[in-house]
Each structure stands twice: as structure tokens, then as C-alpha cells.
Image (cartoon, rainbow, N blue to C red):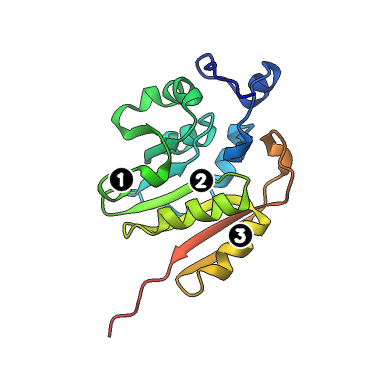
């Protein structure tokens, strides 16, 4: 049975666990438990100052807020309507610099919303097939040339093998299963992705 009630403004993962909040398994939903873990993730990628950061699956907004606090423009995209109030509360102080869209990223017009330089920074769903599909979808837009994603080990391997020479996928750091609630049931990888641009003759 899916829970439909919304959360009170701005709670952390351990608190919603205590409240009995039900995650949506069909979305591969897991929530980052601490801002410290979010800062470690953000420190693993070099983001140009003028870049527009796209976050897919913003969840409770722990990583979202860390990105905005670092001074970047952020577009947080979250499919679960129940998290709207939570994310609005996390990002309210940043005004127009932090944009929130509730919806499936595959139905969002990224091409006209990112500008000239986009960077994907996301904790992808812990469903290998879905995480690969969403990562490839966002990187299919010309303005998005690089990213950092957390995803299951099997998804990282598949992403590297399926994209061939189009993307360079490199593991940069580790993250613990216990950094999430519910705790991840599989090994996770943190990878950077660089789009390989064709050589000009």
C-alpha cells in the first residue's frame, strides 16, 4: 500500500523513517542521511562556476541544498509528489537560483531549461535498469557534457559498456550502503561521466 500523505516541512531521512514513511520501491527510492555525505559527493567533481546543475531524484533535498549552498544554479527534479513540500522548504532561501520540478525527467524539457552548460549531479534510483536509462537520457542533451552519479555497481558497469566511446565513466569515490535510508541492498558506485566530443578535422 502506497502512502499518499505529505511530509512536514524539512525532515531528515532518520526522522521520516521513525514516522513510518513508505518509500516507493518502483522508483528505486532511497534517501541520503546526512549533509556530510552530500558534501563528499559534491567534492568529487569539478563544476564550472557558470554551470547549471541538474539533479534527478532530488528526494529529501539533502544533496540539493548542498549544491545550492555551494553557489551553483540548481534544477532539482523529483517524480514523487509527496516530496514537493519538503523540497520547497529545503530550497526556499535560494530563490530563483534553485528551481524545482515535480515530474518524470524524461518528460521535462531539459533542452530549453539548462542553458549552454549543464552538469548532472544525482543519486540515481537503486534500480540498475532505471538508473542507466535516466543517466543516458539526461546526457543525451547537448548542453549536458559531464556528471557525477551514485548508482548500483551493476548499473555503473552497464553504463560503461553500453556507451562505448561516447562516454568516459570513471569510479571516483565510494559511498556506504548505510549512508542511505532505507539502507542500500546492493554495492553502490560513485562515478564521474565525461561526454567524449568528436574531434574536428
Q: Is residue 86 above or below residue 117?
A: above
Tell me the mark number nearer the camera, choosing from 1 and 3: 1
Residue 45 can be seen, yes or no: no
Task: Give the Cα separation between the discs numbered 1 and 3.
Answer: 26 Å
Decide: marks 2, 1 in contact (CB < 8 A)?
no
The label shown at residue 143 is: none
- Image coordinates for residue 188, horizontal then vertical, percent: 67, 51
Residue 20: which quarter of the image?
top right
SS of the residue under disc 1: loop
Q: Is residue 89 above or below residue 29?
A: above
195 relative position to 96: left or right: right
Residue visible at 67% across and 47% down in the picture: 175
The residue identified by callout 1 is 109
Residue visible at 32% across and 60% down in the picture: 142
The residue identified by callout 2 is 122
Q: Which quadrant of the rendered structure holds the N terminus?
A: top right
Tell me the mark number nearer the camera, choosing from 2 and 1: 1
The residue identified by callout 3 is 156
The earlier-in-sequence mark between 1 and 3 is 1
Residue visible at 38% across and 39% down in the picture: 74
Amino acid at each position: 500500500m502506497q502512502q499518499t500523505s505529505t511530509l512536514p516541512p524539512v525532515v531528515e531521512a532518520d526522522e521520516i523513517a521513525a514516522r513510518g514513511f513508505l518509500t516507493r520501491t518502483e522508483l528505486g527510492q532511497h534517501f541520503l542521511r546526512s549533509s556530510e555525505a552530500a558534501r563528499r559527493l559534491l567534492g568529487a567533481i569539478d563544476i564550472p562556476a557558470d554551470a547549471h546543475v541538474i539533479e534527478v531524484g532530488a528526494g529529501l533535498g539533502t544533496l540539493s541544498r548542498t549544491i545550492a549552498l555551494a553557489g551553483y544554479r540548481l534544477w532539482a527534479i523529483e517524480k514523487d509528489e509527496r516530496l514537493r513540500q519538503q523540497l520547497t522548504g529545503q530550497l526556499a532561501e535560494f530563490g530563483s537560483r534553485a528551481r524545482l520540478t515535480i515530474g518524470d525527467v524524461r518528460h521535462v524539457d531539459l533542452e530549453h531549461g539548462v542553458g549552454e552548460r549543464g552538469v548532472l549531479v544525482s543519486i540515481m534510483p537503486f534500480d540498475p535498469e532505471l538508473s542507466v536509462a535516466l543517466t543516458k537520457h539526461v546526457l543525451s542533451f547537448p548542453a549536458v557534457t559531464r556528471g557525477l552519479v551514485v548508482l548500483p555497481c551493476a548499473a555503473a558497469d552497464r553504463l560503461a559498456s553500453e556507451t562505448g566511446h561516447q562516454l568516459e565513466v570513471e569510479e571516483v569515490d565510494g559511498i556506504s550502503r548505510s549512508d542511505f535510508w532505507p539502507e542500500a541492498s546492493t554495492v553502490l558506485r560513485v562515478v564521474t561521466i565525461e561526454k567524449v566530443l568528436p574531434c574536428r578535422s
